[in-house]
Image: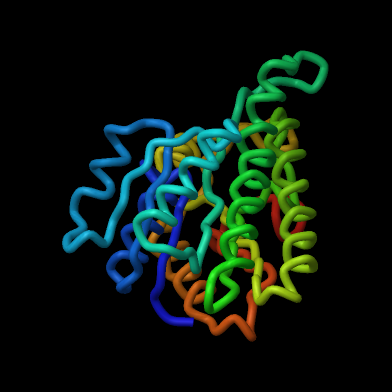
Amino acid sequence: MGAGVALVTGAGSGIGAAVAAGLLDAGWRVALAGRRPGPLRAAAGAAHDGAALAVPADVTDPGAVRELFAAVAGRWGRLDLLVNNAGVFGASAPVEDYSLREWRQVVDTNLTGAFLCAQQAFRMMKDQDPQGGRIINNGSLSAHTPRPRTVAYAASKHAVTGLTKALSLEGRPHRIACGQIDVGNAATDMTGAFGTGTLQADGSVKAEPVMDVRHVVDAVLYMAGLPLEANVQFMTVLATAMPSHVGRG
């Protein structure tokens, strides 16, 4: 498809910031969205010639999401790629102790936020000329295999897979492709503790291998660079030796 206009949510840190930087380096014009203005502007600050646009936005707020997409339309007039990356891990707690407040925060961010952004992207991509675009949802290995004591995160990421499939189906008549990348143990602030020890399914605490986040960026760039006649429906990128995804332990 080539470089065009992209919007990355959760772009102030971690995978989102890395993906936004990779897209900018590849010649895309990129809107970076996130809740914290400071890190967001810092992530966008290295770009020149008007290629980056920092838009503070909370993806759980429908009004803020509408304003975010209006800002993209006002700046560049179209949208070719949405990377639905914003997400939170939430508390670690047994199911019987998991609070409804925490559940709602995780589901609202990881699932409802992705839906609200996809909905606005569909509206733009259907109406623009030339029509169409691509949506890439950040799933997680937790969309396949949950970690213990992460009921809200696991449920929300399994639901993102259903959202991806529904968007793919409904996008067909409008040249809107949708795929999902499921990442295991990219080295970011969120996974910082994995190298020292994290809870396993058998109740033990073990260190887990991590991989450079650049491998995630390369995967997203490949997915984003395809023509709209081709799509990566699901891609899994993980640290090779991480436990509990392939086989038992």
Looking at this view, is 183 or 208 the one in front? Answer: 183
Q: Is residue 242 visible?
A: no
Left-right relation of 136 to 78? right
Looking at this view, is 141 or 87 the one in front? Answer: 87
Q: Position of residue 2 (x, y in %)?
A: 42, 81
Looking at this view, is 238 or 86 the one in front? Answer: 86
Left-right relation of 142 to 79? right
Left-right relation of 161 to 135? right
Looking at this view, is 190 or 163 the one in front? Answer: 163
* 228 vs 202: above or below: below
Question: Residue shown at 47%/52% (left/top)?
Answer: 186
Q: How is the image coloured?
A: rainbow
Q: In which quadrant of the rendered view does residue 169 lie?
A: bottom right
Question: Residue shown at 37%/42% (left/top)?
Answer: 55
* 145 vs 218: above or below: above
Q: Position of residue 178 (x, y in %)?
A: 66, 67
* 84 vs 86: above or below: below
Question: Residue shown at 73%/61% (left/top)?
Answer: 167
Q: Position of residue 138 (x, y in %)?
A: 59, 54
Q: Position of residue 193 (x, y in %)?
A: 46, 34
Total of numbered circles in the picture? 0
* 24 vs 209: above or below: below
